[in-house]
Structure formats: structure tokens, C-alpha cells
Image (cartoon, rainbow, N blue to C red):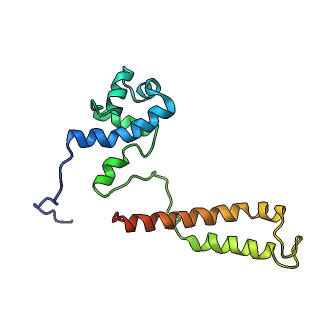
Amino acid sequence: MMQRSNVLPPAIPLTVEDAREILSHPLLALCSEYGPTAVARAIGVREDKTVRDARDEKASLSLHSAANLLLLDGAALDGFLARVGRRSVPVDATCSTDALPSMTGAVHKLVTATSPSSPGGSVLTHFELLDSEAELRQAFDAIGALLIRIDRIKSGVAA
């Protein structure tokens, strides 16, 4: 069994103002998309004024109401987690950051499509391009995931 230390890690406690500011971002996005009345109803709040006040940083949502925001946006509480260097991921998420298989698949598809013996010869036809779409999108997603990691490393956030 792992032994626990009596020393707490250094931390700056979250203030009410910090919490309101962090929660205002997802509330603003959700209210823009669904409207404050629908958001209030979805998170179990009786009055849309409560949601508007929380969105405008004039009041705080109760803990259970804030947690219910996850029903509308799975990343709604990520601002709190980011503050302590954490992030949430779906329970069934899989790590697929190995970009090499999808990139080589896309390259293979394009090389085959632009070979002199292909239907369009060395010119990529509309049909060949459309036929390559799945591989190109997978490569695009894999490269995008790597670029996000690079941005996080550069910004000082653990990747």
C-alpha cells in the first residue's frame, strides 16, 4: 500500500469570483446555443434568471446544477480541471494519437491514385479524390491531435 504524505501540494484556492468566471464561459456558449430558459430546464434550475446571473458572473450555480451542465456539454467543467492541470475524457475514449498508420494510409491511397497506371493517370481525378476521403480525414485528425499536443506543450500545459 502506498504511503501518503502529510504535506499538501502547493495550491492557490479557488475563490468564488474565480469559480464564477470559469463557469461563465460554458454558460455563455450554452445560452447562445439553447437560450437561458432551455439551459435552466436541462440542469434542473427553476428560473432562467439564475442561469443568466451565473452566466453574467453575478451569482453562482449550486454544485449539482453546475455538474448538470455536463448533460449539455461534456467539457463544461474543464475550466475547473484545467486550473489544477487535469482534463476530463469520456469513459469510452481511446487513445489514437499514433498518426503514422493513418498518414501512411493516406499517402498510399494518393500514390496509387496518381500513378500513371491509375484511371486518371498522374492527374488525381474527382473520383480518386473522393475515394481517398476516409484516409485523408483520418490522417487530418491524427495530425490535428499531434498539433494540439504541440500547442499544449508550448503553452506550458502538460500534454
Query: Where is 2 relative to 29, above or below?
Result: below
- At 63% across and 63% down in the image, what residue appears? 138
Q: Does residue 65 show up?
A: no
Q: Considering the image in quadrants, where does the C terminus appear?
A: bottom left
Relative to 132, 35 lies left or right = left
Q: How many marks?
A: 0
Determine the image quadrant of residue 22.
top left
Residue 120: x %, y % from top left: 88, 70
The image quadrant of residue 140 is bottom right
125 in relation to 73, above or below:
below
Is residue 159 rendered to the left or right of residue 102? left
Q: Which of 92 and 107 is in front in this view?
A: 107
Q: Is residue 60 visible?
A: yes
Residue 77, percent from left and from top: 36, 44
- Res 58 quadrant in image: top left
Q: Residue furthest bottom?
A: 116
Asked if residue 28 is positioned above or below residue 88 in the image, the reply reads above
Quarter of the figure with the N terminus: bottom left
Q: Which residue is drawn at 31% across and 58% down?
A: 85
Q: Which residue is drawn at 57% across and 65% down?
A: 142
Spot occupied by residue 74 in the image (x, y as percentages of width and height): 45, 44
Position of 94 with respect to 153 (left or right) is right
- Residue at 39% x, 22% y is 48
Which residue is outermost to the left?
Answer: 6
Pinpoint residue 47: horizontal percent, then vertical percent: 37, 20
